[in-house]
Image (spheres, coloured by chain):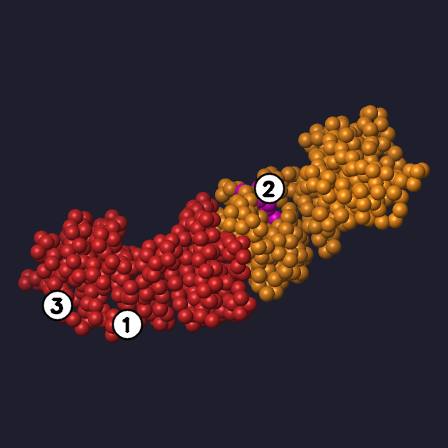
Chain colours: A red, B orange
Amino acid sequence: MPLVVQKYGGTSVGTPERILNVARRVLATQQAGNSVVTVVSAMSGVTDSLIKLARDVSNKPTEREMDVLLATGEQTTIALTAMAINALGGKAVSLTGAQAGIMTDGIHTKAKIANISPRQIRKYLSEGYICIVAGFQGQTVQGSITTLGRGGSDLTAIAIAAALKANNCEIYTDVDGIYTCDPRIVPNARKIDVIAYDELLEMASSGSKVMQSRSVEFAKKFKVPFEVRSSFNTNRGTIVKEETPGLENVVVRGVSVERNQAKVTITNVPDRPGAASRIFTALADAHVIVDVIVQNVSAAGTTDISFTTNRDELEKLGTLLNPIVKEIGASDVLKQEGIAKLSVVGIGMRSHSGVAARLFEALAKGGVNIEMISTSEIKIAVILDEAKIVEAANLAHEAFGLAQA
Amino acid sequence: MPLVVQKYGGTSVGTPERILNVARRVLATQQAGNSVVTVVSAMSGVTDSLIKLARDVSNKPTEREMDVLLATGEQTTIALTAMAINALGGKAVSLTGAQAGIMTDGIHTKAKIANISPRQIRKYLSEGYICIVAGFQGQTVQGSITTLGRGGSDLTAIAIAAALKANNCEIYTDVDGIYTCDPRIVPNARKIDVIAYDELLEMASSGSKVMQSRSVEFAKKFKVPFEVRSSFNTNRGTIVKEETPGLENVVVRGVSVERNQAKVTITNVPDRPGAASRIFTALADAHVIVDVIVQNVSAAGTTDISFTTNRDELEKLGTLLNPIVKEIGASDVLKQEGIAKLSVVGIGMRSHSGVAARLFEALAKGGVNIEMISTSEIKIAVILDEAKIVEAANLAHEAFGLAQA
């Protein structure tokens, strides 16, 4: 019998009515002739309430105990989902991460899955049960409860699909799939039928927050194809899988947009070894996530180094960088808000040339000025004035013909 | 180092502030030179909210899943309590029932403790940790989560105290201890310093709901003395322990009162074997809890059988008993509300005579009529008009000199 692993996120199980809706979908999947393992998240809002409770008793809650606390969120959902399926005449059983055999390392609040021993899942499936597994959680070999960090429920589903060699892995969410661009920005954006892991990774790192990168990376590593689709309708979603020759025929898969960026420029950095290293080591130590970096050597033996980061990081950068600027003998730190990043992504770029040229031409024709450029093997990213980002996204979407299937 | 097991109920951990209060008490106990294991219940109200959620997805929630759901209540409290202790500079670790090694049978929602393997507790205690253990829950040998039913957290504490051979077991609650009578009924009721297991058992079954009978029975079986005391002050409470010659010197330990009783009389029951059995088997099958039963054989070869039960049961009794009355050839079912039960309890009754006489005399002098009488080795219970119960309790309390230490 084919085995399907499904995952429903917090919005999909956010109320008792929605849990019943999920229960009906799960039952229908079983009745269509499949064995089913369903991974669920905490009901939306529950995790935030638990974090608030923790803050009420401690300024800096112990991470081990935070995991014990947060794990109750998914445990509540698995029990309710199994009850709902049973109430509808099905046969379901709930399993916590530990019971499902999700073994992790001991890094609390962001544990990594070490291995999966799905003995209990296999036993219950062989008895005709639907297994409802708590996402986001596992346990160490010593038996401590751990959680997997943001996006952890997707990771649970993909890891179980890998361990059980599932025929299908379906990630249900509140959107219909992955789009060629955010439809709120580009109204004629189209749902993508099939996308390669690497493309989704580049789009995810460029603001398309359907899934966390680590879940996609995990799926890529273990070659688990999965489908991102909506829990509120029965439309087909987007299949995410390994690259195939067919996938490479499309040069640009999608356009993604990231707002709330800031640009920082350090002027007149002496052009000698170690200067850039000094700056970016300090930023890394302070956990500032730096995105695009651009450096041009000028004739006078000094250079301007620019980088972008999230606007929220800007405040702490002044006190961090000013002493370093003095130390390395640079002139100044200039900060610019109100910028955004636009990326075009596609594995077809590897074998097609002229993509950058076509993008720059489209933006130029529309009068959009490019402030910075960054490229990878399958992505071209440009930094723009945030006020122009909607126009730019529509121009890029049009230039690569993304509205047509 | 002496080992203390403490248990805090739902009211004592009902808010983050109260959890911090408990954390301070636990820390103080450790700082006084003890190893400490603390058992906590779900925050008050949490269990009811979870039950409501279950009812929202199912008319008849699966008992296995109910246990998975309810167990999150205590899991939340253990995490918060451990965090609170850590925030106050202590060193605490939380353990679910399963992690604490509470092994049970597989009877979901009312599991019995089979054995305790406190390996993890011992390990953490030896490292100087305070162990915060989830009450009310355990797991089967197959690894399913179970709960112990009402009063289960007391049971957890007493079982752990037995397994670890603790020096003290303290049951913290929202009252100061066990009283000679409910102080809302008898204003000069006095806190009892020491009481025997059997006395508390008789008082518990007579309406003094400080603890569930099964926890007291468990403590009696494993000879675990414990102290019932308040988590809101530092007063000494009531020590519950095995009978000693000293304890037997007190004839009556306390008076307990149960309101909301009802009396049912079946008239003219033919005086032949099997008639009473037919009635009480039907009541047992319908899970009606029958308390006092009285039967007098009349001269005419028929008898009236009376029994008391909780008033809430009265409604379903008509439809249940009417066909049986017809079947066995009795006349009628008479129902009487507005009655109450008064019990005087004391192990000293075993070796002292005249207790019943003194009670009846006191009630008679006060003009209180007795409707039914029931006695055990260490208890005399009388059924009275509910309107007279406060007066009767004060008369009995006075007659046995309970206000004096």
Task: Provide the secondary structure element on which disc 2 rests.
Answer: loop
| Label placed on residue A354 | 3
**What chain is tagged by disc 3?**
A
Q: Is residue A8 magenta?
A: no
Q: Is residue A33 above or below residue B6?
A: below
Question: What is the magenta range?
Answer: B5-14
Q: CA distance from mark 1 to mark 3?
A: 21 Å
Q: Is residue A169 above or below residue A88?
A: below
Marks 1 and 2 share the same chain: no
Find residue B179 and report its horizontal and vertical position in percent: 71, 37
**What chain is tagged by disc 2?**
B
| Label placed on residue A243 | 1
Amino acid beneath label 3 = Gly
Q: Which residue is mark 2?
A: B231
Task: Provide the secondary structure element on which disc 3 rests.
Answer: loop
As drawn, is B300 to the left or to the right of A166?
Answer: right
Amino acid beneath label 2 = Ser
Near-viewer residue (B326 or B34):
B326
